[in-house]
Image (tube, grey):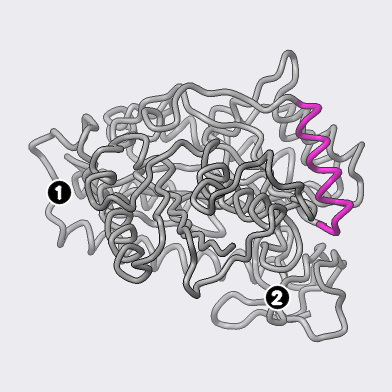
Amino acid sequence: MRARIVNLGCKVNRVESDAFAADLRSFGFSLTDGDPECVIVNTCTVTGEAEKKTRKAVRRELRDYPNANVIVTGCAAAIDANEFASMSERVIVVPKNQVVDVCLECCGLSRESIVPAASDVRFGEGFPSRVGLKIQDGCNNACTYCIVHVARGRAWSVPLSECVAEARKLAAAGAREIVLTGINLGTYHDGDATLATVVRALREQVPSVRIRISSVEPRDVTDDLLQAIAEADGMVCRHLHLPLQSGSTRVLRQMARPYSAERFLDIVERARQVIPELSLSTDIIVGFPGETDEDFQETLRVARLCQFSKIHVFRYSRRVGTPAAERDDQVDPIIAAQRADELARLGDEMRMQEARKRLGSREFVLVEQNGLGTTESYYQVKLDGSFPDSGLVSCELQAVDENGVFSV
């Protein structure tokens, strides 16, 4: 039995696709690009451009693998199942919890007909060294440029006991870094348990593993969460990814983001008071409808004040079905591209500044593939072959090249 998995979109999708892969392997599937019997496309619909790429990907799989059933799942499939189903009689649109069962059915099998032959742990050959642990899904916000809250539904959280049990399995398999993921991770809630509770529980019960928080909304950065990071002495990464989206309070209001630019700066200042070594990355959208030159200059100002170590720059992409897509003050794509280029240059400049500040310091580095590792502060490091695969080692950052890659 042969299957192929195509993953599109966010880190949560990546974790879910890895779960498909682990489950299929446990039922005896080989994951291959050569003549698969079924292809799984885990789709993304966060922007108009992402949706176009998703449709293109499904058509490509239908063309390249004419003997395979193409199982389409994920956010784009949840928004418009009929569009994908109409592409071919070989397309099967299903929710994510049915993907593995449908793969088995395509091969004339069922869960009841096969005894799983291997562990379904998402770690080891074919999986990332920094393994994601999904502890939350869904979103109760409704940013005007985003449709993910429609595709994913209301926010919900994985019970704390299940989070710990899965982390223990991953650690037993050899994982040394677990990345906590979710669509709106900071809203994690299981009884009285919060994201800070999860962090502390994993530190206490899975002490061999470094914890990284993937992305958290600014208003969810509580003092308790900051303290949970600060008290872990590097085994909870002193790195946060806080999506800014715009440095203009006017634009933030039109995006329906629940904070002002000044409030964001206050959050960053507080975080750095508690965690002086903090590395801070972000997402910023340029060219949002109605964004003026003055708004963009405000974004540059706020970015400089935050001293981000990494900026993920996104040009606004019109997503049908969102309020922003209906506006008649769309920004000229040429202007949006110019702004994206300028912001990216600033991001590169600040990334190098932040890297140079870390020269001579020591950080735990996760050893990954191809002679590279990842620091606690989310920089790459060149390593020689003397370091153990997937190990976590303390290194002095001795030099940094023009690409922001350290040597130790």
Question: Which contiguous range is marked in magenta?
Answer: 160-175
What residue did someone put label 2 on?
369
59 or 276, which lies in front? 59
The residue sitting at the top extreme is 191
Task: Please provide percent x and percent y for residue 328.
Answer: 8, 37
- In the image, residue 361 sits, relative to residue 87, either above or below, namely below
Which numbered marker is on residue 220?
A: none
Which numbered marker is on residue 331?
A: 1
130 or 144, which lies in front? 130
- The amino acid sitting under disc 1 is Val
Most common SS among magenta residues: helix
Q: Residue 140: within the magenta?
A: no
Residue, x 73% and y 64% (percent of image)? 375
187 or 132, which lies in front? 132
Badge 2 local density, few (<14 within 10 Å), some, or many (20+)? few
Mark 1 residue element:
loop
Task: State which mark lies toward you, 2 or 1.
Answer: 2
- In the image, residue 238 sits, relative to residue 340, either above or below, namely above
- The amino acid sitting under disc 2 is Gln
